[in-house]
Amino acid sequence: MRVSNGCDILLALAWITGKEISMLDRFPEVLFADVTECTNKERRGMFVYTGQDGNDNIFNALHFYMPNGKPQTFDCIYLEAKPKLVGKSIIKRNRVLLITDCELAMYIPHRENTRDLQIQMSLTFLCCQIPP
């Protein structure tokens, strides 16, 4: 984002390491999505995908430093960052996404932008209503 006097501000940053993409390529079937709050100096949200390997160990799969928790931010993650960093072949092999927060802003853009993916909210949050 350009502010004034030629000054730019970084609003979002997404990344994945070589080891993470390798693990995700080997185990793309189940992903978990979570946003951690207030864990950095700027007190911004950090969106994280994690995966699960054949020994039931969890591994980090994608990181996104978020400007806010609005649905447009999640659209950016799902439609821009994830396809470019992870690749379409891995995305096609992902079968289940478990959203570990009860945030409809995380759920709705995923529901609208995927076809064959089974999306679930965490059972920890039974009080949440999932839109049809």
Image (cartoon, helix red, strand yellow):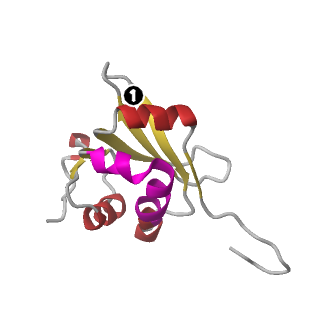
Is 82 in the magenta?
Answer: yes
- x%, y% of residue 92? 30, 50
Residue annotated with mark 1? 58
Task: Check the image and report above or below for 132 versus 84.
Answer: below
Please tell me which residue lies in front, 50 or 83.
Answer: 83
Q: Where is residue 40, by image quadrant? A: top right
Q: Is residue 32 left or right of residue 127?
A: right
Residue at 58% x, 55% y: name it. 44
- x%, y% of residue 16? 54, 43
- x%, y% of residue 15? 57, 47
Residue at 14% x, 65% y: name it. 132
Please tell me which residue lies in front, 46 or 54.
Answer: 54
Residue at 22% x, 55% y: name it. 128
Say what secondary structure mark 1 lies in. strand
Amino acid type indicated by mark 1: Ile
Q: Is residue 62 left or right of residue 128?
A: right
Overall secondary structure of the magenta stretch? Answer: helix
Residue at 18% x, 65% y: name it. 131
Q: Where is residue 58, by image quadrant? A: top left
Is 57 in the magenta?
Answer: no
Q: Is residue 8 left or right of residue 54?
A: right
Magenta-highlighted residues: 76-94
